[in-house]
Amino acid sequence: MPLKLMTSSNASTVQKESVRESTTKTILQAAKVIFSFSSYVDGKLMARSSGFLIDWDEGSKEGTVLTSARIICSKYTALTQWSGTDEYVPDAEIIAHLLDEDETTVPAILFRYDKHINIAVLKVNLDLCAKIPRFSSDINYGQEILVLGRDERLNMTIAHGCVNFMGPTTYERHHYLFTGCEPSIGGMVIDFDGHVLGMANFPGTAYIPSSIVLKCLDMWKKFQCIPRLHIGMKLSPIKFLDPIHVERIFRKCNIDSGLIVKEVSHGSIAEELGVRPGDVVDSVNGECVATTVELENLIMRICENHLDQGGAIGSCMDILVCFFMRCLTAIYFYIFYQSPYVYT
């Protein structure tokens, strides 16, 4: 029987079908641990959110679910506000919508939540016939990703995007990355191999990367809280500017990495020490920081080490922050911070 030669066009079609089949399997596997949640106050619907299983105890049939703190948020602030004044109702009734034939609803118990990071952990009793997904902390900007969630009818929502960065001066939190697609809040952000890269969150296309999520879970387990330093600045990475601006900064200041100070909080230690917009953070405690996610991870690690060494919540500590002050004159300056721990 004569063989049929495959053209490059046919080969491309076969490859696309192979990728599609593999991606479909990944999505269907992940879908088994993605649920829908709704919250109520005085019997009135307050919020909806997706969430996904991160642990399950076979003996007690208790599942641990990661979702957005928006599930208990009753009032949102403007995105441009410096400090969040969102209002939360931790005693709200939370309902989990299961995926059985009868679409059973069961109570979900709020176990932990954090306003600043904007995550919550729920406990739900359920049967499970699915594999708990694995987290991956690798961040590759521009990487293709999938954002999975559920709508109010429990149907899967699937969005395709890429990892990217948007300035925290607009979106208020330094630990957010972005997908470029409209996600389901509380949904799972995965790569094409099914590894969890983070959790979709408010606002818009934001998501919390796995490195932050895992550190939060670890600190909750160790300290029952997520302490963090308030640095009193909004920052934006040089590396995500367009090449024209990066080259100009290098010509004028001889620097090509670091975090540009975009805004300084009134009354903060940063303001007292003379930090101004346009200054550039080069390093913290001797570690260079190129992105705000790197900074957030570093700050959380500093807090964790402080507590591990016997420090107390609410205590003060010194951290060494290296700045290029008044960037256009490229003056290298060292500042000691004494920053308190706070609950956020």
Image: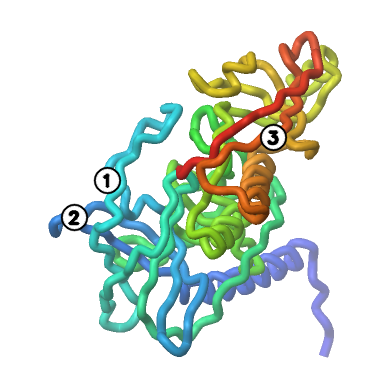
Classify mark 3: helix, strand or loop: strand
> At x 69% / y 29%, what residue is drawn?
259
Q: CA distance from mark 3 to mark 1?
A: 36 Å
Identity of the amino acid at label 2?
Answer: Val
Give percent across and percent down for residue 14.
Answer: 70, 70
Residue 146 visible somewhere in the drawing: no
> At x 44% / y 42%, what residue is drawn?
203
Question: In which quadrant of the rendered image does the N terminus lie?
Answer: bottom right
Give percent across and percent down for residue 182.
Answer: 46, 48
> At x 33% / y 39%, what residue is drawn?
76
Q: Residues within 10 Å of mark 3 (few under 14, many from 20)?
A: some
In the image shown, does 156 or 51 lie closer to the viewer? 51
Mark nearer the viewer, 3 or 1: 3
Circle 1 residue:
74
Classify mark 1: helix, strand or loop: strand
Image position of 87 with respect to 59: above or below: above
Image position of 107 with respect to 94: above or below: below
Give percent across and percent down for residue 35.
Answer: 39, 69
Question: In which quadrant of the rendered image does the C terminus lie?
Answer: top left
Classify mark 2: helix, strand or loop: strand
Circle 3 residue:
319
Identity of the amino acid at label 1?
Answer: Ser
Residue 92 visible somewhere in the drawing: yes
